[in-house]
Every structure is written in C-alpha cells, then in structure tokens.
Image (cartoon, helix red, strand yellow):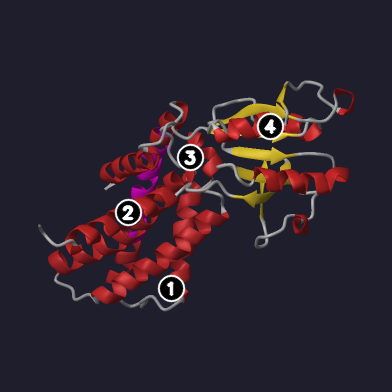
C-alpha cells in the first residue's frame, strides 16, 4: 500500500503542473494526498484484521459496523493531525513524522470512536485483539508511508517542484523580516525581491535591494514570475495599500497585506483569511487562480464535458 500510494502521490502532484510553462506541483495537493494515505492506513488497518478473523478464525463480523468504526476513527485521527500541524504545506522539505505523535493521534481517535458507539465488550477477548491489531497495523502503515513520503517530497522540493516565489511591495522592516525568514531556500519558498515606488529619501531600504516600482511588479506578475505578493506599506498608508491591492487583483498571483490594515478597506469580497510568513502576520486578500486542486477539477470537467459532447454528436 505504501509504495503504490506514494507513487500516486508523485504522479498526481506532478500532474498539477503538467502543461504549464513552469512545471511545478501544488503544495496543497501534495499534503492532501499525504492525508489521504493516512486515512486509508487507518481504514485498512481496521478492515484487514477483521477480514483475517472472519476468514481464518471463523468468527462472524458485522462488515458495516467495522467500516463505520474505521471511518469515524479515521476522521478523528485526521482532526488530531490537523490540530498538531502534521499537514503543514510550508514543510514539504521536512514532512513531520514524530512517531510518538502519530501513535497518540491513533489512540485518541480510537478511544474517541469508542465513546461514539464503536463496539466494545470487556468479556469478548477477540475485540481486544482486533483493536490491538488495528492500532498496530495502522501505526506501522502510517509511519512507513510518512517516512517514504518525507523522502519523496524532500527530493521534489529540492528539485524545485514546489517552488513558491514571494515578492514584497514596500521597503522597510516587514520586507527585511520576510527576506530573513526566506533566506534559506531549503523549504522551496524563494524571496524574489522588494518593489516600491516611493521617493528614495522616504525609503527604509537598509539591507534590501529595490528591484523596481509598482509597474515592474505588475509586469513580473503578468510574466508568471511570482506566486505571492505581500503589500507592506506603513500603517499610515492604509488607503494606499487598499488601492494597490485593487490594482494587483488582475494578476494571477495570491495577494497578502500586513495585518495592520482593516479588512473593510478591501471592497467586494467575503471576510478575509489570515496567514503568516515567519513572524509577519498577513491578511489574505486574493488566492492565486487555478491553484491547488482547481486545475485537476477543471481538467476532469473538461474531460467529462468533452466525452459527453462526443457521445451526443451524431455520426456522419
């Protein structure tokens, strides 16, 4: 299961970038596939011992109950892993393994499932054996899969498969902090540079290289040279930041602003999410279009629609 699952991980993440000029994979798709493998390990770890019991031991099992138990436990396990940042898209170069944390998540999920009505009877020893086999099999499968995924994703990150390029508009302390945080490219997140169109005598550019003005930033975005833009003007320039954010909306990049700006300055959208680059808090103004799962979904839609059109077309 581990080898074939990891093979599909590499194939599907590579497929996200197929046909694009930059041939890069989606971090979100990659980490979601790791999560799918974790869930599959929990489910298979429950069903396999039960099937062996039924086939070899001649015991009667309730298949529906076993499947429901496995699904409930897998969902609880996934929630624990999310809460413990085991699916961090910024750490694809160093995927968390932490065996103790994995085992704790499995135990918590199993005990939680018991409280939700999963079958458990003290007098029935085979249930004890089943739970022990379930926990053991799931733990070994998840640990093995994560070790392989860790190596695979580290190699893909080093090869540039997940490169994410970040530019900052606004020279100053925020830009320096972003630059310092992204100084190492081991994580595959690269600092492109700083852009600013203010007069030189008003810039705090110590330790920064100003690559150009706003029009240069927009040109780089149109050429597909950027993935994220962080707007980091001083707090007194809130309205200027909102104006720039609106100008950048047309670019195929994600846009973020430092969180000292109020979200109501950005019109025409729902409440904005927040994120961070190191210690810099950001307000997420706009996600990059056709990112993560979107290209895969679009390709499936095109394939289905194309197949439907061909089947409906009368033969000539």
Query: Counting residues from the N terminus, which is met first, the one under dot 4 or under dot 2?
Result: 4
Q: Position of residue 255 (x, y in %)?
A: 64, 44
Name the mark nearer the viewer: 4 or 3. Answer: 4
Pick whichever of labels 3 and 2 is earlier in the sequence: 3
Instruction: Residue 95: give its label.
Output: 3
Q: Is residue 61 above or below residue 134?
A: below
Q: Residues within 10 Å of mark 4 (few under 14, many from 20)?
A: few
Task: Please tell me whether mark 1 or mark 3 is closer to you in this view.
Answer: 3
How far is mark 1 from mark 3, CA to CA?
A: 30 Å
The CA span between labels 4 and 3 is 38 Å
- Residue lying at the far front in this picture: please name it: 316
Residue at numbered disc 1:
114
**Distance in Å between CA atoms under marks 2 and 1:** 44 Å
Q: Position of residue 200 (x, y in %)?
A: 85, 23
Q: Nearer the viewer, residue 129 or 263?
A: 263
Q: Which residue is mark 4?
A: 215
Q: Which residue is mark 2?
A: 302
Q: Nearer the viewer, mark 4 or mark 1?
A: 4
The residue mark sitting in front, 3 or 2, is 2
Q: Secondary structure at mark 3?
A: loop
Q: Tell me which label, 2 or 1, sits earlier in the chain.
A: 1
Are the residues at dot 3 and dot 2 in contact (C-beta closer than 8 Å)? no
Q: Which mark is residue 178?
A: none
The answer to which of 86 and 59 lies nearer the viewer is 86
Give the residues in magenta.
Answer: 133-151
Alpha carbon distance from label 3 to label 2: 33 Å
* CA separation in Å, label 4 and label 2: 35 Å
Identified at 30% across, 71% down, the residue is: 66
**Which residue shows up at 20% across the image and 57% down it?**
310
Circles 4 and 3 in contact, beta carbons < 8 Å? no
């Amino acid at each position: 299961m581990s080898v074939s699952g990891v093979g599909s991980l590499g194939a599907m993440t590579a497929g996200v970038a197929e046909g694009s000029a930059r041939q890069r994979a989606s971090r979100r798709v990659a980490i979601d596939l790791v999560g799918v493998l974790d869930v599959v390990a929990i489910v298979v770890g429950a069903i396999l011992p039960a099937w062996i019991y039924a086939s070899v031991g001649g015991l009667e099992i309730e298949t529906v109950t076993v499947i429901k138990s496995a699904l409930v436990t897998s969902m609880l396990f996934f929630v624990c892993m999310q809460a413990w940042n085991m699916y961090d898209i910024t750490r694809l170069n160093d995927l968390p393994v932490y065996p103790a944390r994995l085992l704790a998540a499995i135990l918590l999920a199993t005990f939680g499932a018991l409280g939700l009505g999963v079958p458990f009877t003290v007098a029935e020893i085979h249930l004890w054996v089943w739970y022990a086999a379930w926990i053991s099999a799931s733990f070994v499968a998840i640990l093995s899969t994560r070790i392989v995924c860790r190596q695979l994703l580290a190699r893909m990150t080093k090869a540039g498969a997940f490169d994410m390029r970040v530019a900052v508009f606004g020279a100053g302390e925020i830009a320096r902090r972003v630059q310092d945080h992204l100084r190492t490219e081991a994580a595959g997140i690269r600092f492109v540079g700083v852009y600013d169109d203010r007069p030189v005598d008003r810039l705090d550019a110590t330790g920064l290289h100003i690559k150009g003005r706003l029009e240069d930033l927009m040109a780089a975005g149109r050429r597909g040279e950027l993935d994220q833009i962080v707007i980091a003007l001083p707090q007194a320039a809130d309205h200027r930041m909102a104006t720039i954010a609106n100008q950048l909306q047309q670019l195929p990049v994600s846009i973020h602003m430092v969180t000292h700006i109020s979200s109501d300055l950005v019109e025409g959208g729902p409440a904005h999410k927040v994120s961070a680059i190191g210690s810099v808090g950001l307000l997420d103004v706009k996600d990059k279009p056709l990112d993560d799962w979107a290209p895969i979904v679009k390709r499936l839609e095109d394939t289905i629609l194309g197949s439907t059109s061909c089947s409906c077309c009368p033969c000539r």
